[in-house]
Amino acid sequence: MVTDRTAPVETATLAAEVEGLLEPAEADGVYRDTRECTSALLFLGLLLISPPTPRPKTDNR
């Protein structure tokens, strides 16, 4: 009878790889500041609320 002795080692390696994929490390330098996000949202909101620029009147009657 032939016994495969490499299976437990391969299984442990595969399990470690799967765990690494499920819980990836955080990327360095990707942090959001709440004040920056708030000010950006406020600025975008003010741009949306502001009235459009006036158009010159045309006299084509």
Image (cartoon, helix red, strand yellow):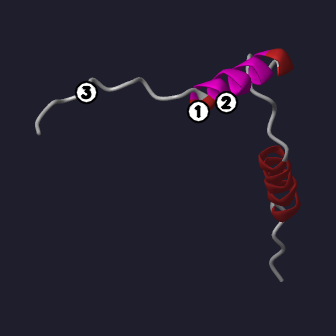
Please give the name of the residue rendered at 46% of the width and 29% of the height, measured from the top-left corner: 52
**Amino acid found under the numbered disc labelled 3:** Lys
The Cα–Cα distance between marks 3 and 2, rounded to whole angstroms, is 29 Å
**Image vertical order of residue 10 relative to residue 33, above or below:** below
From the image, tell me which residue sits under label 3: 57
Please give the name of the residue rendered at 75% of the width and 18% of the height, measured from the top-left corner: 39
Cβ atoms at labels 1 and 2 below 8 Å apart: yes
For this orientation, the residue located farthest to the left is 60
The Cα–Cα distance between marks 1 and 2, rounded to whole angstroms, is 5 Å
Image position of 9 (left or right of 28): right
**Image vertical order of residue 30 relative to residue 25, above or below:** above
Is residue 43 highlighted in magenta?
yes
Magenta span covers which residues? Answer: 36-47
From the image, tell me which residue sits under label 1: 48
From the image, tell me which residue sits under label 2: 45
**Image vertical order of residue 16 relative to residue 2, above or below:** above
For this orientation, the residue located farthest to the bottom is 1
- Residue 46 visible in rendering: yes
**Amino acid found under the numbered disc labelled 2:** Gly
Question: Depth-wise, is mark 3 or mark 1 nearer the camera?
Answer: 3
Question: Depth-wise, is mark 3 or mark 2 nearer the camera?
Answer: 3
In the foreground, 19 or 6:
19
Q: Quadrant of the C terminus?
A: top left
Location of residue 50 (image quadrant): top right
Residue 60's disc number: none
- Residue 31 visible in rendering: no
List x then y, in percent, for residue 2. Answer: 80, 78
**Image vertical order of residue 54 relative to residue 24, above or below:** above
In the foreground, 24 or 43:
43
Give the mark nearer the N terminus: 3 vs 1: 1
In the foreground, 37 or 61:
61
